Image (spheres, helix red, strand yellow):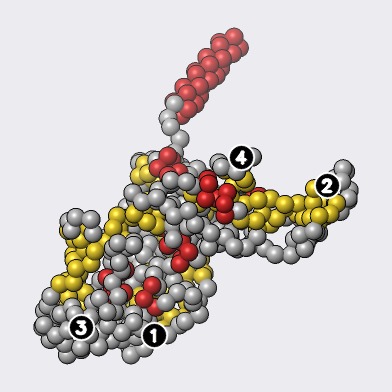
Amino acid sequence: MQSSLKKSLYLGLAALSFGAVATVSTTASAKSYATAGAYSTLKADATTRNVQATGSNALYTKPGTVKGAKVVASKATMADLAASKKSASYFRAYGVKTTNRGSVYYRVVTMDGKYRGYVYGGKSDTAFAGGIKSAETTTAATTPARTTGYYLKDVSKNTIWTAPKYTQYKASKVNLYNAAKTDTFTVDKAATKTLEGSLYYHVTDTKDSSISGWIYAGKGYQANVTDANQDMGGLSFTKSADAATTDNSITVHYVLNSNSNSLGTTTYTTSVTGTKKDQLISAAGDSKTNDSQNLVNFAVKNVPTGYGFDSTAKAPTTASVSQAKFGGTLTVRVAAVATSKVSFYTPSADGIAAGTKLAATDIQGGFPTLDATKQETLQGDAGTVVPATVLDGLFTDKTFTSTQKVASADITDAKDADGNATTIKAGENYYISYTYAPTATANANKDVKFGTTLKAVFTPSTVKGDVKTTNGNGNANYVE
């Protein structure tokens, strides 16, 4: 009996053990999924919920570890969005779910609406982490010195936004239905789009304060530039012109001076009221040199790209356009132009070719600065040899390197600040003074034509003492 009981118990335990093993094995073979909690809408101010992908996690239709989650944007795509330089790639976070494993997934959408889904956001629903991070979509910029007297360049085209486009989710155009082209606007703030770097001004219509928002401002207001040459994007200091008619417009026809081939036309519309067809522009009072929108300025500003004026193709003047008539055509002759850049050298031993090329770091403060007027001297007919003296008027000032200290041996071939021969002893300070060399420059640029890089030659001298003069930064558009 005892033996029989023991045998029954043993068999029972064996069967139980087998069943337990079978149960465990079945459970282990099934994939383990997380479950997501209830969806919560984020309540914080919307502008604080702008985020940027980090590229470390993909975007899913559901929290990524939940059964049925599908990829909306792969990890590689999210990495591309993280590296993007376009504001459309920012996301707005607007909802959140937390899984039973403590993982937080934020519901997000790109500013352009292209991608929408859940992305892993770390372990806290009060801070962005994991696949996204907080983003400042705009950066505050300096408000312009001039804040009043702005016009919309074209009311029908230039748009005001509730926020610079794609810097806030669903940024929209402001209704300009009640805005007139005669309305002036004031500027009270400025900002740049963080990724693109483009400048925007916040403007308000002085006649209707409900018309207010952000507008692309180009280079922004520049205090040292005339009103006619300001590049302010959708803004201007002159009200937009009326629609062109034969009573208020003149066709400007550009032709190549060498053979009179047409290069195209553009239409000028006067800002003067009451003009009539066949009326002389001079009689209408529209040829004054101080009128930022006069025909002379318009004709010069709208020359086709790659063309300009030289000794044979003269720029229009008040006198030369005085006989133009409304409803008629003004022919402007231009020449093919090329722009040379400048590189900086020391003299060669023979004084004919240039010697060693200088880098911007060789000169304190960088290369000498050229203003717009001086840069124009680097333009000319593409087939014309550059005048030997073209650079002579550009670099009249000496340029200097940073102060250095004599290490050991004396420098005997040196000068003092007045140009007198001197010796610089060990431990004393000195600097290198570069002086423009016109003859060496002319020799180095013999027979060079416009469009070719010019070589400005500077003679170096070792000068005792400390540098007291610095240069402005060089213009990148003319320095090679």
Task: Residue 145 in the image: state x and y as whole percent.
Answer: 50, 80
Residue assigned mark 1 = 149
Sequence-wise, which precedes: disc 1 or disc 3? 1
Q: Which residue is mark 2?
A: 411
Distance, label 2 to label 1, CA atoms, is: 60 Å
Q: CA distance from mark 1 to mark 3?
A: 26 Å
Specify whether 421 is left or right of 165: right
Under circle 3, the secondary element is: loop
Foreground: disc 2 or disc 1: 2
The quarter holding residue 75 reads: top left
Mark 2–mark 1 CB contact (< 8 Å):
no
Residue 312 location, x and y as percent? 30, 62
> Can residue 420 be seen in this snapshot?
yes
Which mark is first along the chain, 3 or 2?
3
Q: Nearer the viewer, residue 223 or 296?
A: 296
The numbered mark at residue 281 is 3
Task: Check disc 4: other Cα within 10 Å, few if <14, some if 14-19, many if 20+.
Answer: few
* Circle 4: residue type: Asp
- In space, the residues marked 4 and 3 are separated at their CA atoms by 58 Å
- Residue 360 in sight from this viewpoint: no
Label 3 crowd (10 A; few <14 / some 14-19 / many >=20)? many
The amino acid on which the numbered mark 2 sits, given as a three-letter code, is: Ile
